[in-house]
Amino acid sequence: HRRTRPGSVRRAPSTMVLKTERCSFSGLRVYPGHGTRLTKIDSSTFLFLNGKCKKLFNQKKKPAKLAWTTTYRKAHKKDIEASTTRKKRRVNKSAFTRSLVGASLEVLAKKRNEKPEVRAAAREAALREIKERAKKAKGKK
């Protein structure tokens, strides 16, 4: 029980913030002063919570196959109630035709309503014109 000086204000004890890291194998929190760090020759570092995690890592076990690891829990959809997310509803937007830069709505409607034969004929005429232009260009060279 602490005594306070007369006139001084008593403060609530401040909570200390600890910087925790994640275990490379299990995904559990590793508090300062705990765990083992492994540095490989290629200078990649791994932090393990305990000897169990380190041994399993060295045996090249897959953490997703061990029920107590966080990767397993994520893979098998455990702990979902903790982070429930609402499914997004799709908004059905009605089809709306806008005029393009080169053509107005009337031109687009006219093109849509024309017969396929007319369209094919127009395409052939355009191709013929391109071929003729190419022949002329070749003739000039």
Image (cartoon, rainbow, N blue to C red):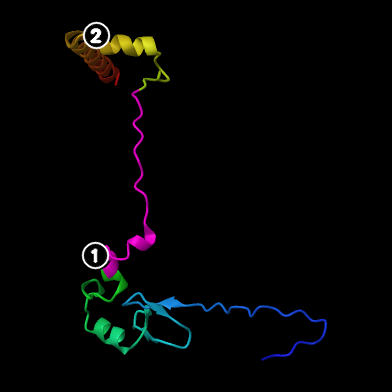
Q: Residues within 10 Å of mark 2 (few under 14, many from 20)?
A: few
The residue type indicated by label 2 comes to: Glu
Residue at 17% x, 9% y is: 117
Depicted 97 relative to depicted 68: above or below: above
Q: Say which residue appears at 72% left-offset and 80% top-offset.
A: 10
- Residue that label 2 marks: 114
Can you give x and y, in whole percent of width and height, for residue 25 in the image? 31, 77
Secondary structure under badge 2? loop
Give x and y (percent) for residue 85.
Answer: 37, 53
* Of labels 2 and 1, the one closer to you: 1
**Is 27 located above or below residue 91 in the figure?**
below
Estimate the spatial distance between the alpha carbons at disc 2 and disc 1, rounded to whole Å: 56 Å
Residue appearing at x 37%, y 63% in the figure: 82
Determine contact: label 2, label 1, CB under 8 Å. no
Q: Which residue is mark 1?
A: 76
Q: Tell me the quadrant of the picture where the N terminus can be found.
A: bottom right
Q: Position of residue 67 (x, y in %)?
A: 24, 74
Front position in the image: 90 or 23: 90
Residues rendered magenta in the picture = 73-95
Q: Nearer the viewer, residue 15 or 94?
A: 15
Q: Is residue 86 magenta?
A: yes
| Left or right, residue 69 beside residue 2 | left
* Quarter where residue 61 is shown: bottom left
Give x and y (percent) for residue 84.
36, 56
Q: Quadrant of residue 89?
A: top left
